[in-house]
Image (cartoon, rainbow, N blue to C red):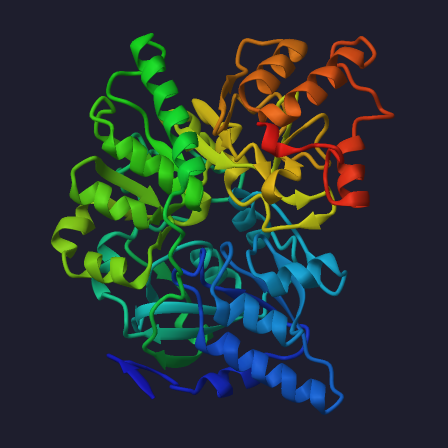
Amino acid sequence: MYVSDKIAFPVISAEEAAGLIPHDAMVGFSGFTPAGAAKAVPRALAARARALHAAGQPYQIRVLTGASTGASLDQALADAEAISWRAPYQSSKGMRDLANNGEADFLDMHLSHVSQMVLRGIYGKMDFAVIEATEVTPDGRVYMTTSIGNNPSYLQYAEKIIIELNQYHSPRLREMADVLIVPPPPHRSIIPIMEPMTKIGAPCALVDPKKIVGVVHTNEPDETTPFSPAGDISKKIAGNVVNFLLEEMAAGRMPGQFLPLQSGVGDVANAVLECLGKNPDIPPFTMFTEVFQDACVDLMESGRLVAASATALTVTPPQLQRIYADMDFYAPRIVLRPMEISNNPGVARRLGVIAMNTAIEVDIYGHVNSTHVGGTQIMNGIGGSGDFERNGFLSFFMCPSIAKGGCISTIVPMCTHVDHNEHSVQIIVTEHGLADLRNLAPVRRARKIIENCAHPAYREYLLDYLERAPRGHIRHDLSRCFEMHLNLKACGKMLPDLDLRQF
């Protein structure tokens, strides 16, 4: 038994925990990226699924998380064909394959919406929640590890709770936590966050202790992997972003003390943060974002990043140990919140967040596809990008101008799928330049994107498409708008006769 003062929670193995979860159960798992993700129980669930499948018995569960997770959760369950339904975001190849092959239902959605949908029962009954924590107390206080994500809502709504008590993580993480569940409408008042470090909640989530059916002891790091060092293209994109921000400050269109940053995860995002940190003309800044990632560690220790609000410490184990070794420094400078708060559109609008996210493709009018290759194949999902881009003071979408050695242009006549429309997208950035779309009508937007952002090898085609399209407020030739995509499908190149050696 796990004895916490007067309450004795049963200590069980991961295999025993998996045995409690029946076929077709809805399970809410901790984890926002691999940070704080449940590990031992999902691995045991995958093993159970394989054994039952080998015996000719069905076994799949429905899975909710905070966002993407680690290999022990999404990838392990997908490899075991143990997922029938999944929301709200993923980045696992196995889960991606299940979704694209029609073998599992994947619901892609804005992350700020998930908690309300759960608490209102939109997804049906949540049978279990499996939550990683550093401590659980007799009165039901659950102190979480490196992410908050949707844990507070899952603990409140699930009928039964399994705690993965992970001794790897510092118990001082509670000093960063700021947990609040927003009440349902019409009883909501303003969320009183006036700057990124404002704390409005508690250091823990609460659960009815009677719902805890088992505690599984673990001692494992998060399965966070490092991103590649910034390459030349990422550095050029970052330079274009930083130069634009300096111009906005010089023109008086942005406060001199700067504004909080939101940054997506990945090589380009890390490059932008590093470039901001190295430029002496950018004042020390704060972040109001989803993830605190590796690049933020050096920025914070150098004094360039002075404070950060997020929902997850998405850092590699060496960087996390660096944080744990100096919690006196980091704890007062980082706040971890539930993602309903970290991604709240109203707070992002109030703080004037500068939103920086990445795109798969951008069309000539500024629509952005950030989720589906060729309009049909899911990559990861929309995540929190929509929560911020629609409500940010400035909204950037960034991508290299070409992919697959130049066979693909990321600037296209019409996006094959639209996550972010022209009315919300403000600024497009590639390694070739930047298009500020904020005061431009559609045709002028198109020319600006083509001239500033498209790869030179594709500009002639895109300008020809624009000029030859039938006249209208938005010009499109419906017989040609997907010609580049059809060429790619037919012969592997968007422009079959293109020779990039000329450029």
| Left or right: 9 as drawn, with respect to 256 | right
| Left or right: 376 as drawn, with respect to 27 | right
Residue that appears at 56% across and 56% down: 90
Residue that appears at 15% across and 61% down: 325
Residue that appears at 62% across and 33% down: 500
Where the N terminus falls, by quadrant?
bottom left
**Above-or-below relation of 204 to 465:** below
Which of the 4 image quarters holds residue 225? bottom left
Across and down, in percent, residue 321 comes to 22, 62
Tell which of 358 and 88 is nearer to you: 358
Residue that appears at 55% across and 23% down: 453
| Residue furthest out toward the right | 479
Across and down, in percent, residue 129 comes to 50, 68
Which of the 4 image quarters holds residue 55? bottom right
**Above-or-below relation of 77 to 496:** below
Across and down, in percent, residue 70 comes to 47, 65
**Above-or-below relation of 251 to 128:** above
